[in-house]
Every structure is written in structure tokens, then in C-alpha cells.
């Protein structure tokens, strides 16, 4: 059986459902999955740099925005995966219960897969709270891969005045020797 | 000019060392001057018959021509000859003329030996005084010297290419060609699917514009950091060079220089740094109503590319220079000028930039059009996001149902 063309699929509702479930929605899921992955990688790097910069509110605020965007994209990947499966199941329902749908399937030469095809895209892991102080990241040093390395927040300079100059009041000058007199 | 954190740290170590030498000179010289004054006063009070024993004046170099302050770096070791700068009267001490008695000569030798030992001790006090200054300066600068603008720029280029560059909304709002069909579904999950599908493009638009905010924020961080780093490095180098000049002058004048050559140190112009940082985000399509107008954000991709290009070229940005109104004469003034400038001009200037990033450019003109996008700031972006969440417009909803969405009776 050869796959019908896009134009042919668009001639019937069940063809549209087939195209949405096996092409449009999975493609979008793959795309958003890739975007979420890139965003996660970028935010991981920026989280480390923000920690090194002292985790000022402007930076942790920006990171929390990035974390919120990532969460939405991650949810979108799962939703797109579920949507593809749901549209497929809906098409199968029509094929089972509706004569016209069955005829369209036959005309288009389509056989509906029973499970999602292609396989669902990965939503990837959730990100930690990026607005929290410090960062945890993986690093490669000289070919060695280290996981979950903690990067602390660079502290503010010491709040105590550094009164180095006052040390001059400390040790007295040495005593003056007496000139040699016989 | 690229920032070299290793070189910067080494420059601070060098400043600590040279500042110790300078303070050592000042302490040892102060000791000799004080000792001479005390001795002159003492001898003036001596009975005339003692003076008749042969009181006269002798300088250290006349006893030991090789004596120098004990600087570990021989090129900065000072021979104390003059009492008050070059070609003033020699720095002489009242002593009693040794006659033919060995004892008198031995006493004079002992006097000068003690004098030199004490001057060395005073010098070492000065050297010890500067210990810890480099570490303190490093801690003041750490929040901008630990950061890598190049790493940030690389991350932003990747975000632009692999995230923003792909977050295009579909040209067709019915991008999966399913809108017409799905209108007939009334089963489980049908309304959640419809809501998700209808709002999908808007979701992409919001993700795009809010990711732009993140890129802009870290772009500003890269620019600010680069400006602070390069400025602090040039400032530290100018302080170090000033110290070298003054130490060389001590050696040349064989005394405390009467008028030490100083040059006002280089400092970065933070006003210009802020200006450059704001300029790179100036064209961003930010916030306010724009976030709700998905159709507008497509046209902004080019601007973001330019922003990222500008940021990626952080090392090429020149922020101008200015001269600090800081006196660099003598060890304590140099110490104060160094630490105050690093703290007030650099650290606080850098933090001020981050505060501006949070609250917005204080020099931006308020928009005259009430419908215009609001100026960029992280606070504003956070407010926009909270508003969208409050109105349940932030997320396009979620499709959790993966089964059929039809009910018996739904039309095909």
C-alpha cells in the first residue's frame, strides 16, 4: 500500500485526522521537544552564570521566566503526543461506527495504526527551581564528565569595612638607639 | 580588549606586593626621620662639656655605602641619602667623634647597626601592612570577574538559533487541518483538545516573546560584565604602573620623593556601559500588549538576531575611558583610592546596572502612546507573566486524554 498524497488526504475528514495524528501533531511535538531541550541547555548555562554573578533579583527573575516558558513547552509536548493519539483513536472510532468514514478509508487506501506512529516525542525532564540560589550542573573538565556539580552564589564583598589603613596605628616604630659616646 | 581573569588576579597580587614596598619605604624613612629628630633634640640638651667631646653628624651611607632598605626586589631597594627629597640636606645623625679609643668606634658602629636593624624592622612592618589587599579586591570584584560574558554570549546564540529561531507560529492557524473536523466532537477530552489547539499559536508567541526577555536580560549581563571586567583590569593596571613609577622615584631620589609623579587612574565610564547595554536591547519587541499580539512577533526575529550578534561580539565593545579624580600619592592614598574605586565605581556600578535591568532604564522616555509596548525590564516581564497566569492565558491548557473524543451521534 502506498501512502496517499497530502492532497488526497485532504479530500476526506478521516484523511485529515490521519494526517494530523501521524504527521502534523507528531512533527510539532518533535519541534517543541527540540526547542524545550535547547532552552533547558541554555538556561542551565545561564543559571550557572547568574550564580557566579551573585544571583541578583534581575537574573533570578529572568531565570524564573525561562523556567516558566520551559514548563509550558514541556506540557505542550505531552499534550501534542496525547492529542495525536486521541485524534487517531477518534478516527478509529469513526471507522468502526460510520459507513462514510469506512468508505473514505477504503478510497484513500488507508490503514489506521492502532498506536501512535511515530513514537511520542520526549518532553524531557523538568527543570529545577532556577530562581533558587546557586546552580547544579554537569561539567566536562579535561575529558572527564562530572554530574551534579554545585555552583555556589558568589557572595557580596564583605560588609565589614576593610580598615587596612588603621593597622598603621598598630606596631610602634622601633626605639631610637643612643649615639655612641665614650 | 578581552578580560584575562588570571592576569587581573596577578595584577592585584603585584599591587599588594608593590604597595607593601611603598609602605615599607615610608615606614623606614619615617623611622629614620623620627630617630634623627629625637637624637638632635636629645643632643641639644646635653651639657656643653659633653658636646665638647666631639659631637658631629654622620649619615648611614657614609658609614655603609651599600645599605639599602631591605626590599626583596633589588631594583626597588632605596638607599636613604637625603632628608627631604632629592638634593636636600643629607639624612645625618648626631654622633660622637671616635677618637683613638676602640671603644668609641665600636659604640658608633653599634649605633648605626641598631639604626639599620630598626629601619629594616620598620620596613618589614610596611610590607606586612599590605597583606590581604589583593584578596579583598578579588572579593569586591568577584561578582563580575567570575562571570564569563563569552559563555553567556555563546548560550544566547544557541538559544537564538535553536529555540527562538524555531518558535515560529504556523502561518495557518489550522496548521493540523483538524479544526473543522474537531468541531463535531463532544466526547471526553474534546473541549480540552479544542482549547489547546486554538491557543497553540498564541502559546508559541508568548514563549517567543518571554524567551526574548530572558535573552535580553542575559545580554545586558554580558555587556555589563564585560564593561566592568575590562574597566577593572585597566584600572588595576594603571594603579600598578603608578606604584612602579613612585617606587622608581624613591630609588632615583634616594629619599621620599618631594613631589611623586602620579597619574589619575583609568576608570571605566559606567554611564557609557549602561548606554551600550541598553542599546542592545533597545530594539526588542517587548512586553505589554505585544505579548498578546502573536502576529507581530514574527517580524522581530531579525532584531533578536542583531541583539545576539551584538552580544556575541562583547569583546569588541569599547566603552570609553575617563580618569578618576583619585589621588594616588603615597601608600595609604593608593590603598584608599584602589579599594574605594573598586567598590564604589565598579562593584556598585555593576550592581546598579543589574538594578536597572530589574526595574527598567531610568533614562528611557516614557511612551507617549498609551497602547505602546512598555519599556523593557524584568519586573515588567514578571508582572506581564503573572497577569497572564492570573487570567488563565499563560498556558494553552493540557491534553491529558489520549482516547477517542467522539460520542455516539457525533457527525462524521
Image (cartoon, coloured by chain):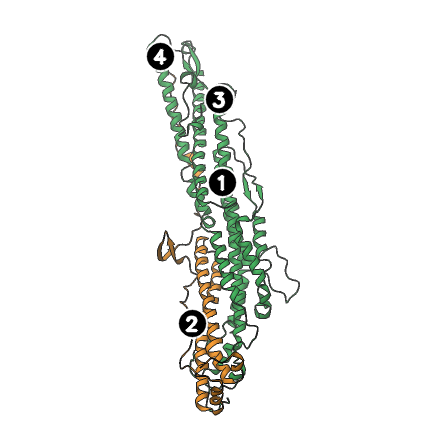
Q: What is the secondary structure assignment of the residue under circle 2?
A: loop
Query: Subunit of mark 1?
Result: B
Q: CA distance from mark 2 to mark 4?
A: 100 Å
Marks 1/4 in contact by CB < 8 Å: the verdict is: no
Tell me the orange chain: A
Q: Is residue B54 above or below residue A126?
A: above
Q: Nearer the viewer, mark 1 or mark 4?
A: 1
Q: Residues within 10 Å of mark 4 (few under 14, many from 20)?
A: some
Residue A137 rendering spot, x and y as whole percentages: 39, 58
Q: Mark 3 vs mark 2: tell me if same chain.
A: no
**Percent coordinates x, y for residue A42 in the rendering:** 46, 60
- Write down the chain letter for disc 2: A
- Judging by the rendered image, the residue that carries numbered circle 2 is A121
Residue under pointer 3:
B83
Q: CA distance from mark 1 to mark 2?
A: 53 Å
| Residue at the spot 46% in from the left edge and 48% down from the top edge | B145
Q: Residue at x 41, y 20 (%)?
A: B66
Of labels 4 and 3, earlier in sequence is 3
Residue highlighted by disc 4: B104
Q: Which residue is mark 1?
A: B236
On the same chain, marks 1 and 2? The answer is no
Q: Is residue B382 visible?
A: no
Disc 4/disc 3 C-alpha distance (Å): 26 Å
A120 over B254 or under it: above or below: below
- Tag 4 near tag 3, CB within 8 Å: no
Tag in front: 4 or 3: 3
Task: Check the image and name the residue furthest to the right.
Answer: B368
Which residue is pictured at 47% across the width and 26% down the height? Answer: B251
Mark 1 vs mark 2: in front:
2
Q: Nearer the viewer, residue B379 or A37?
A: A37
Amino acid at each position: 500500500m502506498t501512502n496517499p498524497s497530502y492532497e488526497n488526504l485532504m479530500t476526506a475528514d478521516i484523511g485529515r485526522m490521519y494526517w494530523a495524528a501521524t504527521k502534523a501533531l507528531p512533527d510539532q511535538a518533535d519541534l517543541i521537544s527540540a526547542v524545550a531541550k535547547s532552552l533547558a541547555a541554555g538556561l542551565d548555562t545561564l543559571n550557572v552564570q547568574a550564580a557566579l554573578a551573585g544571583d541578583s533579583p534581575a537574573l533570578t527573575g529572568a531565570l524564573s521566566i525561562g523556567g516558566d516558558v520551559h514548563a509550558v513547552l514541556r506540557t505542550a509536548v505531552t499534550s501534542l503526543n496525547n492529542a495525536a493519539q486521541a485524534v487517531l483513536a477518534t478516527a478509529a472510532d469513526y471507522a468502526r461506527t460510520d459507513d462514510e468514514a469506512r468508505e473514505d478509508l477504503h478510497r484513500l487506501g488507508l490503514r489506521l495504526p492502532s498506536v501512535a506512529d511515530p513514537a511520542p516525542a520526549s518532553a524531557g525532564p523538568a527543570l529545577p527551581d532556577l530562581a533558587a540560589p546557586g546552580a547544579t550542573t554537569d561539567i566536562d573538565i579535561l575529558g572527564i564528565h562530572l554530574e551534579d556539580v554545585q555552583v555556589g552564589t558568589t557572595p557580596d564583598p564583605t560588609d565589614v569595612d576593610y580598615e587596612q589603613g588603621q593597622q598603621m596605628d598598630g606596631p610602634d616604630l622601633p626605639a631610637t638607639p643612643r649615639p655612641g659616646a665614650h | 580588549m578581552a578580560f584575562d581573569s588570571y592576569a587581573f588576579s596577578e595584577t592585584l597580587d603585584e599591587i599588594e606586593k608593590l604597595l607593601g614596598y611603598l609602605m615599607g619605604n615610608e615606614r623606614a624613612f619615617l623611622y629614620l626621620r623620627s630617630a634623627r629628630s629625637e637624637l638632635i633634640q636629645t643632643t641639644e640638651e646635653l651639657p656643653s662639656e659633653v658636646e665638647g667631646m666631639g659631637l658631629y653628624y654622620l649619615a648611614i651611607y657614609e658609614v655603609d655605602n651599600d645599605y639599602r632598605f631591605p626590599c626583596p626586589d633589588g631594583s626597588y631597594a632605596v638607599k636613604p641619602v637625603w632628608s627631604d627629597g632629592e638634593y636636600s640636606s643629607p639624612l645625618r645623625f648626631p654622633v660622637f667623634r671616635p677618637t683613638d679609643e676602640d671603644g668609641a668606634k665600636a659604640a658608633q658602629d653599634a649605633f648605626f647597626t641598631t639604626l639599620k636593624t630598626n629601619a629594616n624592622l620598620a620596613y618589614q612592618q610596611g610590607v606586612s601592612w599590605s597583606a590581604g589587599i589583593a584578596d579583598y579586591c578579588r572579593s569586591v570584584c568577584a561578582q563580575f570577574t567570575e562571570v564569563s560574558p563569552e559563555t553567556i554570549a555563546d548560550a544566547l546564540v544557541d538559544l537564538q538559533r535553536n529555540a527562538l529561531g524555531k518558535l515560529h507560529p504556523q502561518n495557518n492557524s489550522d496548521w493540523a487541518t483538524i479544526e473543522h473536523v474537531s468541531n463535531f466532537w463532544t466526547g471526553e477530552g474534546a473541549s480540552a483538545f479544542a482549547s489547546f489547539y486554538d491557543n497553540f499559536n498564541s502559546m508559541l508567541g508568548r514563549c517567543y516573546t518571554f524567551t526574548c526577555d530572558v535573552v535580553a536580560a542575559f545580554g545586558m549581563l554580558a555587556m555589563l560584565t564585560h564593561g566592568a571586567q575590562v574597566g577593572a583590569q585597566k584600572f588595576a593596571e594603571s594603579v600598578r604602573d603608578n606604584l612602579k613609577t613612585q617606587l622608581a622615584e624613591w630609588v632615583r631620589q634616594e629619599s621620599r620623593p618631594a613631589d611623586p609623579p602620579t597619574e589619575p587612574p583609568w576608570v571605566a565610564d559606567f554611564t557609557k556601559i549602561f548606554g551600550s547595554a541598553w542599546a542592545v536591547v533597545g530594539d526588542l519587541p517587548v512586553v505589554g500588549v505585544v505579548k498578546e499580539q502573536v502576529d507581530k512577533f514574527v517580524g522581530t526575529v531579525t532584531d533578536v538576531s542583531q541583539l545576539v550578534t551584538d552580544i556575541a561580539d562583547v569583546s569588541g565593545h569599547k566603552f570609553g575611558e575617563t580618569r578618576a579624580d583619585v589621588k594616588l600619592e603615597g601608600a595609604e592614598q593608593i590603598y584608599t583610592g584602589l579599594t574605594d574605586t573598586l567598590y564604589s565605581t565598579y562593584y556598585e556600578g555593576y550592581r546598579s546596572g543589574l538594578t536597572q535591568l530589574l526595574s527598567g532604564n531610568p533614562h528611557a522616555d516614557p511612551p507617549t502612546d498609551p497602547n505602546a509596548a512598555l519599556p523593557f525590564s524584568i519586573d515588567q516581564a514578571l508582572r506581564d507573566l503573572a497577569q497572564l497566569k492570573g487570567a488563565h492565558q499563560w498556558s494553552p491548557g493540557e491534553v491529558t486524554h489520549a482516547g477517542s473524543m467522539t460520542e455516539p451521534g457525533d457527525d462524521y
